[in-house]
Every structure is written in structure tokens, then in C-alpha cells.
């Protein structure tokens, strides 16, 4: 039974890597474009991350700034990985046609 779970783990990892590669390729094909509202969201996440980490009191200086960058980095990663760039680009194209 453990071998089957290991097999599914490997298959799932391969599928995830292939899908991620597809979405990053689609993002690069569009010139690395993100919708403007997403940059505003990422900036807000940076601010929230900064305030959250600062309130913990453990991080200071450059460590605090670098750790705060993880929040928007995760958001950008998920936006690309889950197909948000492609959906936003398609919506932009539909608006241009109308």
C-alpha cells in the first residue's frame, strides 16, 4: 500500500510541475504581463506582511524587509500557477473586441 502512495506522490508531482511549466510559459508568452489591480494587491500584501512580522517583534531591519517580500511573492506565484494571468488576458481581449 505504501508503494502505491509513493507512486501517486510521484505522479502528482510530475503533473503539478507540467501544469506549472505550462502556466509560466503562457505568462512569459504574454510578455510577463500582470493586470494593474494585481500589483496594487501585491503592494497591499507587502504592507500587511510587514506589519504582521513587525508585530511579532522577532524580525528587524533587512530581515523584516526580506521576509515581508514573501507575501507578494507567494501571491504572484499563485496568480501565475492558477492561471490568473491567462484569465485576465482573455478578459482584456474580450473588452477590446466589444
Image (cartoon, helix red, strand yellow):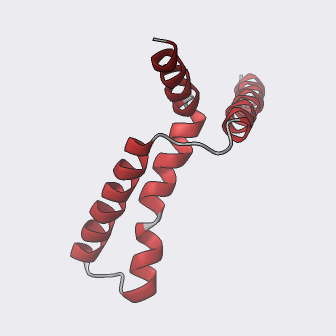
Q: Foreground residue, 27 or 51?
A: 27
From the viewer's perspective, is residue 52 above or below residue 79?
A: below
Q: Position of residue 60 (x, y in %)?
A: 36, 86
Question: Which quadrant is the N terminus positioned in?
Answer: top right
Q: Position of residue 36 (x, y in %)?
A: 42, 44
Which residue is rendered at x = 37% and y = 42% of the image?
A: 37
From the viewer's perspective, is residue 11 above or below residue 71?
A: above
**Dividing the picture into quarters, in which one does residue 67 lie?**
bottom left
Q: Residue furthest bottom?
A: 61
Q: Foreground residue, 14 or 68?
A: 68
Task: Please state if 52 lies on the left or on the right of 26 as rendered.
Answer: left
Q: Position of residue 15 (x, y in %)?
A: 74, 26
Question: Which quadrant is the C terminus positioned in?
Answer: top left
Which residue is rendered at x = 66% and y = 37% of the image?
A: 27
Which residue is rendered at x = 35% and y = 51% of the image?
A: 40
Q: Residue furthest left?
A: 55
Task: Please state if 87 lies on the left or on the right of 23 as rendered.
Answer: left
Task: Please state if 88 lies on the left or on the right of 28 as rendered.
Answer: left
Which residue is rendered at x = 46% and y = 47% of the image?
A: 75
From the viewer's perspective, is residue 29 above or below residue 62?
A: above
For the image shown, how many numbered marks are present on the structure?
A: 0
Task: Please state if 12 lies on the left or on the right of 72 as rendered.
Answer: right
**Dividing the picture into quarters, in which one does residue 80 lie?**
top right
Q: Position of residue 39 (x, y in %)?
A: 42, 50
Amino acid at each position: 500500500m505504501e508503494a502505491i502512495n509513493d507512486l501517486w506522490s510521484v505522479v502528482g508531482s510530475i503533473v503539478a510541475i507540467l501544469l506549472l511549466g505550462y502556466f509560466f510559459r503562457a505568462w512569459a508568452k504574454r510578455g510577463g504581463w500582470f493586470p494593474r489591480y494585481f500589483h496594487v494587491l501585491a503592494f497591499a500584501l507587502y504592507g500587511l506582511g510587514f506589519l504582521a512580522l513587525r508585530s511579532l517583534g522577532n524580525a528587524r531591519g533587512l530581515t523584516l524587509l526580506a521576509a515581508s517580500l514573501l507575501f507578494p511573492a507567494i501571491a504572484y506565484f499563485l496568480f501565475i500557477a492558477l492561471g490568473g494571468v491567462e484569465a485576465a488576458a482573455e478578459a482584456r481581449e474580450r473588452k477590446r473586441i466589444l
